[in-house]
Amino acid sequence: MKIDYTSYKDVKLKGKKVLIRVDINSNIDTDKMEIRDSPRIRALAPALNEHFKKSAVVILAHQSRPGKPDFTDLSLHAKEIEKEIKRPVKFVKDIFGEEAIKAIKDLKPGEVLVLDNVRKFEGEMKNYKNFSDAEATELVQKLFPLVDYVIVDAFGAAHRAHASIVGWPKMLAGPITDKELGALKKIIENPDKPMAMLIGGAKAIDKFKAMKYNFESDKLDYALCSGLTAVLIFEALGKNMGEPNHKIIAKDLEENHDMIKETYEKFKDKILLPVDLVIDDNGNRKIITVDEAETYNSTTGDIGP
């Protein structure tokens, strides 16, 4: 398997109008309607100042998902971007309607425009099996002709077959995606051996399937599992990890129980699981054994020492 792609570095961007699909999903205090912290906006800022400063930049992004309390417009994000890049950033509460189209057409090199939350478009999150259906959406049909280049740099959302990710007839990889793909290219095409994968965080079943694939394709030698991926494996093996943990992984466990158990049994000599865990015990950091997890009404955090 080879990774071949065209990146933003392969074209001249000076004076061009570019649409950048980024991932600036942020931690929002919904009571104060403030962004608590956004490392993704901080990561975006250098690219805007170094690579796209002489381009007219249209930013397309999402925040949360419909139905959640932090599903907001991107006005807060525009203000945060402005603080980070230390120059004006425009925001329109529109995605591809008349207001957005006019703002894009009027945009000059050196200026930055943030469009509204792309997930407000009902056709965005359909998980398109046929990418031509994504290309046919009003989002793509309206925005694509307005810019010289579309740059997809939402690496954190790149696994989703959403219209703004896979619908563009032509697209370039952005700086963050280029860096990540470069690392993946080395791992896939010429990995150092032995290779170990450290797995943690959310979206446990996706990470478990990635681990399974890499074991079966003989690219991976060891996997060190923590977080919800470890919880998923423990529960598939019959261990009670406590109700708070179970609730998070219940659906994935029910749908994939046999696959998880069979994969673990096949590669158990190469899969390392934690023997102790860290939990929040009424505001205090507490170290417990895996066997004690069922007695605490708390989700597990870090692995223990």
Image (spheres, grey):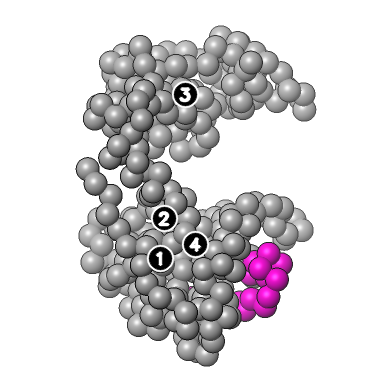
Q: Disc 1 versus disc 4: distance between alpha carbons?
A: 17 Å
Kind of residue at disc 3: Cys
Circles 1 and 2: CB atoms closer than 8 Å: yes
Q: Going 47% across and 16% down the picture, which residue do you hit?
A: 273
> Closest to the observer: 217 or 33?
217
Kind of residue at disc 2: Asp
> In which quadrant of the rendered view does residue 172 lie?
bottom left
Circles 2 and 4: CB atoms closer than 8 Å: no
Q: Which mark is residue 225?
A: 3
> Closest to the observer: 226 or 174?
174
Q: Earlier in the sequence, mark 4 or mark 3?
A: 4
Viewer-nearest of labels 1 and 2? 1
Q: Give the residue number, with chain letter if any, for mark 2.
A: 178
Q: Give the residue number, with chain letter if any, for mark 1.
A: 9
Residue 131, magenta (yes or no) = no
Is residue 124 in sight in this rendering? no
Viewer-nearest of labels 2 and 4? 2
Q: Going 72% across and 60% down the picture, which residue do you hit?
A: 33
Counting from the top left corner in percent of width and height, residue 221 is at 34, 22
Q: Going 48% across and 89% down the picture, which residue do you hit?
A: 105
Q: Earlier in the sequence, mark 1 or mark 3?
A: 1
Q: Give the residue number, with chain letter if any, for mark 4.
A: 22
Q: Secondary structure at mark 2?
A: helix
Circles 3 and 2: CB atoms closer than 8 Å: no
Q: Disc 3 versus disc 2: distance between alpha carbons?
A: 27 Å
Circles 1 and 3: CB atoms closer than 8 Å: no
> Closest to the observer: 294 or 305?
305
Kind of residue at disc 4: Val
Q: Earlier in the sequence, mark 3 or mark 2?
A: 2
Q: Which residues are magenta?
A: 78-96
